[in-house]
Image (spheres, coloured by chain):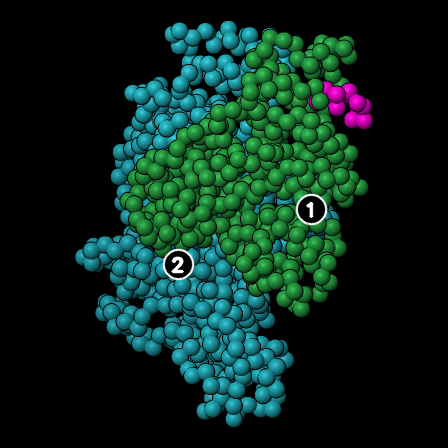
Amino acid sequence: MKPVSSRFSPRLLDLETLEALTVGREAVCAHLVDSIWDAVSSGQGRFDVVVGPRGIGKSHTFGLVEGRLRERDKAQQQVVIVALPEEFHPSSLVHLLAKVLELMPDEDGLPRVASQLANLRMGPQGEALKTAQRLIAGRLGARGLLLMVENFDAILRDLGTKGQASLRRLVQRMGCWSIFATARTTKGWTEQTAPLHGTFNVEQLAPLDASSATELIRQLARLHGQTDLHEWLGSDEGRLHVHSTYALLGGNPRVMAMVFHHLDHDDPGDLYGNFFRLAEELTPYYQEQMERLSRGQRPVVEFLAERWSPASVTEISNGTFCPQASVSTHLRALKRDHLVHALKVGKNRYYELSDPLHRIARAMKRDQQLGNALSNMARVWGVMARNDFGHASLSPLQAFHAPPPEYIENLTSEILRHSIKGDDNKVDALTDCLIAHGQSDSSSLHTICGTLLLTKSDKKAHHFIDMQSRRDFGVYVITSLYLILTHNPALRRELPLSWPKLVQSTDISLFYATDELLEITRDCIRSIEQKGGPKSLATLLIISVLRDFGENAAAQLYQSLEHDLTLQNQKLLGVAAWFHNSRLFYEDLVAQPLAGTDEGRSISTLFAIDSSSDGHSTLSPEQEEWSLENADWLATLWIAGRPTLPTSHTFSLSTGSEDRFELLSGQSSVKAFMYLPREMRRFIRVSLTFLHASNLLEAFPAEDQLIEH
Amino acid sequence: MCSEVTKLEIPTNPGGSLRPEHVLGRNELIQRYWAALETQSIALLAPRRVGKTSITKRMIAYHPDGWIVHSRDLENLDSLEGFVRALFEDVEEHVSRSTQVTTHARKLLDSLGITQLKDFHFKPQSLDWRRLLDHVFKDLDELALQRDEKFVLFWDEFTYFLSELANEGREREAMDLLDALRAARQRYLHVRMVLTGSIGLPEVERRLRAAGHNNRALNDVAAHIVPLFDEANARIVIGALFRGAKLPASAALSDAIYRVSEGHPMLIQLLIERLKRSERPSPEAVDTIFTELIEPPGDPLDLRHYIDRLPANFPAEQLEPVYAVLDHVALHPEQTPTAMLSALDLDRTALTNLLRHLTDDFYLVKVRESRGYRFRFGFLRRFWIEERGL
């Protein structure tokens, strides 16, 4: 029986199946096929390589391009296509050419390939290269040769520099020999000093976007005859499920295919179960990968796999008891092999595993609680950025899918109905759908979330919160809080009259007078921190309250969370207080912990400047001196925080606009950011987007800016 | 010789093997090279991917009457012995194809009791290899004379081969070879050489001089720096690639491509290759594509190499002055050395030497009109400014 899909060897599939499973790669495949065909049919030699990490779809692209070119050549017979086996390690260029010869078809009027190979083997060794080349050219006649090679970088390593130079010379001399290849990296063979520099057109395959990832899983369901699953994946719930998975795992097509194979078809929405089964399958793979590493590399990878936070060389060195110089050497090699990537901030580098699954697989095996937390978190992220997760210009509030208003109304009614009935599973599933559509009608979403959170006398609602792992991992709750807190004031007006407790809470700040809610919030944040979550989550929450609900509400939250705030958090809060014109909040709460720090002096000075009519008169001598000494970055902050005010202040505004965020990007908040794992960094960025804190957002680099290639 | 075909459609193929008839925009240049070869051997030098190989390919395919041509890439050779053997093999193949007589070189080997070339081993200081080399050229010269033609040997990556010898501490062998080749050029007047390389001859000579070899063994070879396309020829190439890519002929697009590529053949190919994938090919799209193309990492020209190779090409104590000179030229193009002196902490001799070295190494070029220096490529200057944070 022919295979319907293959996660590791897509080349085994027929062209029709490959075509059906081609998602998000149509443009690149069409370009490659057309360009290669144009070159070979005009007698030129062309060289293309598709590059990307493991599982990104190189083999699939390879198989598809091969299939389409063979189809195209059927009528015209202009080229002989020879595809090397995926696993092939030539000892020399002669060996490579002998394999090419071996794979050429026997044709009428030409000597048998087997006999030519025998002659080649028995001929003089010094002549073998010329002979092989002559034999291949003889079989080609006027046709071109298209050599298709997977893992080309490994083959080039086997050939060595001289072999590469010979290969280049050979293809240049033959003129109409082309190569289409895949490789995990171009490093080491495309630099100016390498023989093949500038020869190959490099096509980098990017991860799939969320929609393509969903489509891929749907196509898999269709090809496997899973009609119900196919339909479910097309539903809101199904899409949410895939988006959630995507948010955590990224858009690697092989991972997505694995996710499909681990979907429990009776309970496809069981995200935790998916991850667990995936981890089960991958564990031997990662164990084997560890075995293949050198003795010195293993502890480094292990350290990073256990740590939910990127680490500097010093930290890795301390953690592994290995000298820094050796750690650097190991990291360079691991980076070259795409096992680790470096995040770059200024001159500093932080390292983390490139493959999130490696860490997740370890975590799932070890800690069910963490596994649950991850799946919950993924679900929330999937909701928050359904269409555009992780993108630098992410704007979840605009990006959400917009269904018809009546659909949302019906869904809302359904949730409330099931909630009253006590059907918590249904409430859970439908709420997820509603959250996914929250963008289009956020009042409904917030009505539900807010209601469920705040009407603690309602057992069903309370149970719903419990079910969302409040005590295990409070991301869902926190996210719900975000959704409430960042919502527009229309929330209060639109609350349904059938929920009197909420309606009575006309002052939103009363939300925080609810001790239990404050307690929940604090527990959640602590839980997140203990699990390696962002240390500044509490800070971000306070900032959002400060901005949207004023100083009183923020002060209550601050007092509840104060013990969890570090000095760095306080500094960020101080800056935020100034940004949001919350002098009272600053002076009553944050000024004291910041007393004596540079930030404290600066923020006090900025507030003093704010309150002066000419920007000068109310400054104390100490502040005046401080502002003169620190004119540049006070100006920077000023420009960022008071963009609409005239710039006629005492300090110099000579700082260019590109330095505007120097303070934020150069200080500890970003360093703290760098210490978060990738998932958390995304979370922060999403949160800041919700806060409309575009100035802060700019200070936290997006992933594509962080990763050093 | 094949004439320039201005209506040709050529598929874009950056870095690929072009057919000789697809090598456009180089006819005048090639004619100049053949004219130069009438009187002396030449060297064609340029950074990688400027089109040296394509030019020689076209020269070989459409060589004028009266020439016998042979080419060999020397990049994979790593010894004097290897070079001599390769030359012997190449020439014997040619000569024995044309005449049935035993070659002088073969006779020499016979007299040394060597029946197979693989048994011919020698020490660099021995005279045997010089005699063999001399006999090989004698064979070539006689063949050419007999046919009333001239023989031209195209040696690709000749300078790379020499620099590799020097890098391995075998400068003596490199120098001996250069001396032997010069002697052959002077003695056998029907033989010419076309030496190509992405490392400049002065750079090779400098390395040899640094090892104490002061012979000017290449001063009879006319060095030509292969230029980028001028505007007229760039437009011929761009037009043919546009037709091949089925892009509409557009003067604005063509202008933009010439402007940003500065006539660099590889960049022209890359720009049009990407442009044909663009939903709206426009001059603005050309600018965007160009910015992406020269942005490391992954830039096809590997511009970072211009920074990375400096420590290998200059002694440690010269590095800071080199960076200072390049920084200065990047910010103040076309300044004369005299004007530079006031801004740099260097004496005139040191500055002149550095400028010459940087010119030989394809970083800078001297502008005849202003007598000042600028970066050889405008895009390299922009890259330098960006990378150095100037």
Residue A247 vs residue A390, the one in the foreground: A390
Q: Residue at x 32, y 74 (%)?
A: A505
Residue A393 — which label? 2
Q: For the residue labelled by badge 1, is the local secondary structure a helix, a strand or a loop?
A: helix
Amino acid carrying mark 1 in the image:
Ala
Magenta stretch bounds: B122-133
Residue A281 visible to an observer of this rendering: no
Question: Could you tell me how far apart the alpha carbons at marks 1 and 2 are, in whole angstroms?
Answer: 42 Å
Q: Which residue is mark 1?
A: B312
Residue A683 vs residue A527, the one in the foreground: A683
Residue B75 vs residue A370, the one in the foreground: B75
- The quadrant holding residue A673 is bottom right
- Mark nearest the camera among 1 and 2 is 1
In the rendering, what colour is chain A? Answer: cyan
Q: Residue A248 location, x and y as percent?
A: 44, 48
Residue B139 vs residue A23, the one in the foreground: B139
Q: Is residue A301 above or below residue A15?
A: below
Q: Residue at x 71, y 41 (%)?
A: B205
Same-chain check, marks 1 and 2: no
Q: Residue at x 57, y 49 (%)?
A: B304
Q: Residue A245 location, x and y as percent?
A: 41, 46
Q: Is residue B158 above or below residue B116?
A: below
Q: Is residue A530 above or below residue A8?
A: below
Q: Residue A334 location, x and y as percent?
A: 61, 42
Q: Is residue A534 left or right of residue B82?
A: left
Residue A84 visible to an observer of this rendering: yes
Q: For the residue labelled by badge 2, is the local secondary structure a helix, a strand or a loop?
A: loop
Q: Residue A109 location, x and y as percent?
A: 40, 6
Read off the chain for label 1. Answer: B
- The quadrant holding residue A492 is bottom left
| Few, some or many residues within 10 Å of mark 1 (<14, 14–19, 20+) | few
Q: Which chain is green?
A: B
